[in-house]
Amino acid sequence: MLDHLKLDIDHGTPRRESTEEVTLEIDGFPVTVPKGTSLMRAAVDAGIKVPKLCATDSLEPFGSCRLCLVEVEGRKGFPASCTTPAEAGMKVKTQTPKLQDLRKGVMELYISDHPLDCLTCSANGNCELQDMAGVTGLRNVRYGVGAAAGAHHCDSKKDESNPYFTYDPSKCIVCNRCVRACEETQGTFALTISGRGFESRVSPGQDQPFMESECVSCGACVEACPTATLQEKSVIWLGQPEHSVITTCAYCGVGCGFKAEMKGTQVVRMVPWKDGKANEGHSCVKGRFAWGYATHQDRITKPMIRASIQDPWQEVSWEVALNHAASEFRRIQAKHGKDSIGGITSSRCTNEETYLVQKLIRAAFGNNNVDTCARVCHSPTGYGLGQTLGTSAGTQTFKSVEKADVIMVIGANPSEAHPVFASRMKRRLREGAKLIVVDPRRIDLVKSPHIQAAHHLQLKPGTNVAVITALAHVIVTEGLVNEAYVAERCDPKSFNQWREFVARPENSPEALEAASGVPAAELRGAARLYATGASDGTAAVTRRPNAAIYYGLGVTEHSQGSTMVMGIANLAMATGNVGREGVGVNPLRGQNNVQGSCDMGSFPHELPGYRHISDSTVRGQFEAAWGVTLNPEPGLRIPNMFDAALSGSFKGLYCEGEDIVQSDPNTKHVAAAMMAMECVVVQDIFLNETAKYAHVFLPGSSFLEKDGTFTNAERRISRVRKVMPPLAGYADWEVTQKLAQALGYPMDYKNPEEIMAEIAALTPTFAGVSYEKIERLGSVQWPCNEHTEEAGTPIMHVDKFVRGKGRFIITQYVPTDEKVTRKFPLLLTTGRILSQYNVGAQTRRTPNNQWHSEDRLEIHPHDAEERGIKDDDWVGIASRAGDTVLRATVTERVQPGVVYTTFHFPESGANVITTDNSDWATNCPEYKVTAVQVMPVQQPSDWQREYSRFNQAQQDALQQARQPEGAHGK
């Protein structure tokens, strides 16, 4: 029954890469392996399993358990096969009478200090110690067990402080796998071995409980543990799973592959998939453990309608809800015109579901009023990279960072927002790659265990473009441009104009130091390091380094977000750092399918595949396939929808899987726009902040309840597989299809595979994408068509840029309009934290709240002292847009003059104080720069009091619908 748990082959030690091969003989069988391969792995390649406990193929060999001993002809002793490299001509024996005796003796020692509760143990059926006792033929323990053996640990106290797993030291065999996983795989170094000799035990921190240590609950230690020492609480409660389904995580843009291990339709645990290309068997606390929201009691599983947001909800049938929504949309259009309604697609839904929503809006609504949450995060990436390189996505795979010599992280905090990729990056940094961090805060990467940034450019918020232009100035004026690369790959006219511009004295680090706050010498050192591999500019004599740039919302969410993206592309092209492994321009996407939502045509001016709606040839292809005439004019962006609603011309909205009321800036403005609409239809799994302004609620489905695909930040298209039926009866794509039918537009897909087939037929970059191919290869990366490899394109722009010649664009620094004043003397910037995700609708409904239960304001000690603020004090934060109240954290992570908060809790009102400033090209909000004042207060803000009242009224309205007598339309 538990065979599925052992389908993955564990080779014992990691794979080695080598151009040389060696041939040897193991138990009489010849085997050829890459040079450097361990004897243990070579044996597995030959189909021979060597007993082991401390070895696993995700960790470097350790050689402590002494079970994997072998005999090598001509050598004395019994070497450990995990630590002994294969050599040409070796003759190895893995099973002899002497080896049998040695292994049995070792197992006796292990079992003498181990509880013999196998039948009631939570790891029963999935315990390597149990397996090895059987393999070695252990039948009795001469020394006795536990107290009978003398000193023992069998009564050691279990640590249950972590909400997701337990640590039972009585079952620990001190194999070190958990400690090594924390170091090698995760890079946190939260675990160690405490004590000496027989008293050695795994210790979180300094003999602390797990929840008081630096453990980030990624689960690497749990996955590595060969016994029940570290065990998921869900397995303890539910028992071992009986089957598994491979799917893709629904949190950040890394797109980790997971095995959902199941009992029937109940998830027992989520285990990171070893063959997942994005994560290679690693995970973070959210993907590994925070999936319980899918069956949370707050899930709404019945459609609801109401006439006004002051009215109670009424539960109705699907037919009634969909027909009501369709009739309202048609009524509004008849009265106010075809353009008076629109829709918003979801970055949390699948590609197929997103494609259907934008198709419904264009074909059934008859307009292009469609937008997506990428508007408020990475829309400048699409614009900036499209203008310079010719395509709107990152250039590399995540694995590419393993070949980088220099890594520049700009406006991103991977340890918190993209932790699995951060672990991969940290591993490369520990191996010797150099790091440059450009961020107003001292993020984890600046200095953490065995990692220290060579340069931290701690700029003032809003001065990104000044810094990127100054970096370019150094590279141009000090002769560090890769002239051969530029001559071959880039447009000479635009390059020469750019070179002349950045070389001007007013763009030097010295000239821009006052504006940016970055010391000129520090900035020059960073520029030289990026271009040459050394801060003094001397290392590029023989070979230019592989230099990679990774950036996040600290780049895009600015008034010059698009300019900054283009500045990053300029820098990469000028130094020849695009088009091979270890380099590139890499946006770190925030949500699981934000890349896919953009790919699928969610912007008002673009059809799927980033083709402009005004292109008559492209439009004709979609018109022929969809059977309608499409409007050639771009529709409204999200901010335009809000403005039009307030002016009276936009009256209806279909919002699938996005919480615009909490996530968009200037909350009061957004709420006023929502109240001005006559019909808001929200499709979601919870009554989120946007749904509180809705007139129709259509229950959505979680990622565990749907089939389809997600596209991650590296353009990797991976399968999402249904592991349980939709709690509301329909997957999201089915709801959208039924709404289209209610509107009178025919959609008749049988499954998501048919939708993907249509996407592939209409989108050149997806022409080679199919479910069959993804099933066979695990994943594919767009572009994927007849011009690429079968699995698509891992590295973009290898021989030439998508647009032909790379285009340099002048990046004139223009200070933001959001400036500090005597009234608002501080700058607020925002970000994320590891345990919470986006607006928190998912993670707030999990035990992740035990790490972060409220949004807090970080303030520098100097600014706090000036205002009489102490740690944990309540403080009021006021801007020109509004004010709110948060608890203070006094810390030197932020620089003087800068404060910082997160936005995961709706009651915090973080976006009440952000303004309507936005990027000049894309309207991406300027979340990262808001002028504020901070002062001690004693009570919540007026907005928070009103929010509390409104929220309670909406919860009461929901509860009335859930009462049996409130049901309608059955």
Image: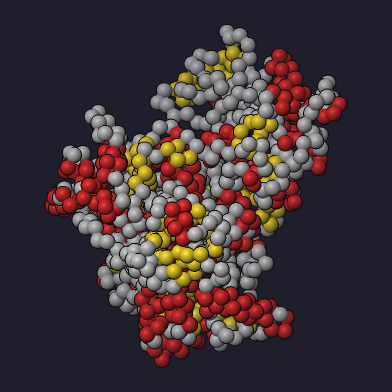
Q: Quadrant of the C terminus?
A: bottom right
Q: Residue at x 67, y 67 (%)?
A: 297
Q: Is residue 718 above or below residue 83?
A: below
* Direction bottom: furthest residue: 335
Residue 824 in which image quadrant: bottom left
Residue 660 visible in the snapshot:
no
Count the marks.
0
Q: Quadrant of the N terminus?
A: top right
On the image, the x and y values in percent for residue 431 come to: 43, 32
Q: How is the image coloured?
A: secondary structure
Relative to 602, is 64 on the left or the right?
Answer: right
Relative to 310, is 36 on the left or the right?
Answer: left
On the image, the x and y values in percent for residue 577 come to: 28, 42
Relative to 183, is 626 on the left or the right?
Answer: left
Front in this rendered view, residue 411 or 958: 411
Front in this rendered view, residue 421 or 781: 421
On the image, the x and y values in percent for residue 550 come to: 37, 48
Q: Residue at x 60, y 23 (%)?
A: 63
Front in this rendered view, residue 450 or 499: 450
Residue 188 in which image quadrant: top right
On the image, the x and y values in percent for residue 901 come to: 48, 59
Q: Is residue 541 above or below residue 604?
A: above
Q: Residue at x 24, y 51 (%)?
A: 512
Q: Residue at x 41, y 23 (%)?
A: 20
Q: Is residue 375 above or below residue 947?
A: above
* Direction right: furthest residue: 148
Residue 560 visible in the snapshot:
yes
Residue 227 in which image quadrant: top right
